Image (tube, rainbow, N blue to C red):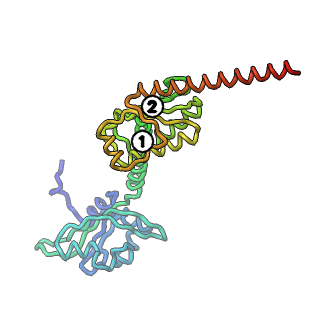
Amino acid sequence: MKDLSEINLDEGFLSEIINAITSGIFVTDLENNILMINRAGAKMVGKSSGDCFDRKCYDIFDTPMCQTNECTCKIATTNKVVNHGETMLHVDGREIPIEFTSRPLKNFEGEIIGCVENFIDISERLEKDRIIMEQKEELLKKREEDIRHLQDEILELSTPVIEVWNGIVALPLIGTLDSHRAHIAMQRLLESIEQTRSSFVIIDITGVPTVDSEVASHVLQTAGAVRLMGCETILTGVGPHIARVISEGNVDLENIIVQARMTDGLHYAIGKLAERKERMNRVASLIEVSGSRSGHNR
């Protein structure tokens, strides 16, 4: 078996090797004249190798870098470096993204006499990258949506509205109360009032570590919305620190009934419901007696 040193590397043999390469390759002198181009390179610009020979490279390859200081062959030969990058090749009104590498060409004495450039069409690769990027974005979007749904579910679980008695619902709050959570709590509370037709709402803030003027404002807004639905608000769990904050903030609790503990609030609400029922029974009895008298007189 012969090694390469025993083979006569004539011009035709080298041409066959270069033409077998699937990426585009061309060689230019220092005046940008094309000295050689393989079939793949000529095919990419819609020409034959013979059409490109002894032509200026910028007449064959139309890129934004041509005939500028960004010319890749100029950079490679002037700076004596390998220049690598990506650009857009314009062919018959089409744009083809390519990846290129330019190297200075030296003679046997080490003098730079031209440039060797190879390039490949990266359209397929970029399309795959685009598809992969879209898939990643979709996955991230779905993940964000799942996280938001999970956060909403956690918020709903952390703001449970409980029907503790016929006509009484309770909202025990635990943890930090921000505007988003307060909005969800108000919405769930109003929905529960509509469903249960409750007359009293107990908002317990025993588990809320700190209360500032903003949180107090949220509680007042909730109480106002509850009152518009014909319901009374009972606030429980107000500790010394929270009481001081509310007092110093001049928060108006005129329309809110304050009780020490949730059990106290529940007893108060049950007592008020019992009083209302007793009054309604007395009124019903009076109406019944009045009706019977009127019938007797007739």
Count residues near mark 2 (Cα–Cα under 10 Å), then give few for <14, some for 14-19, many for 20+: some
Q: Amino acid at mark 1?
A: Arg
- Residues marked 2 and 1 touching at CB (< 8 Å): no
Q: Amino acid type of disc 2? A: Pro
What separation in Å lies between label 2 and label 1 (alpha carbons)? 12 Å
Residue at image coords 70%, 23%? 284
Residue 43 visible, this orientation? no
SS at circle 2: loop
Residue at mark 1: 181
Q: Determine whether, in the image, residue 15 is placed left or right of residue 215.
A: left
Q: Residue 100 at x, y = what percent? A: 30, 64
Helix, strand or loop for disc 1: helix
- Residue 81, by quadrant, is bottom left
Q: Residue at x 42, y 45 (%)?
A: 180
Q: Is residue 126 left or right of residue 268?
A: left
From the viewer's perspective, is residue 22 above or below residue 58?
A: above
Residue at the location (79% across, 22% down)? 291
Q: In the image as oriented, which residue stretches furthest toward the front?
A: 297
Q: Which mark is drawn over residue 160?
A: 2
Q: In the figure, residue 191 lies in which quadrant?
A: top right
User: Picture coordinates of residue 259 (x, y %)?
Assistant: 41, 32
Q: Is residue 204 above or below residue 135?
A: above
Q: Residue at x 41, y 53 (%)?
A: 130
185 relative to 125, above or below: above
Residue 1 visible in this rendered orientation of the protein: yes
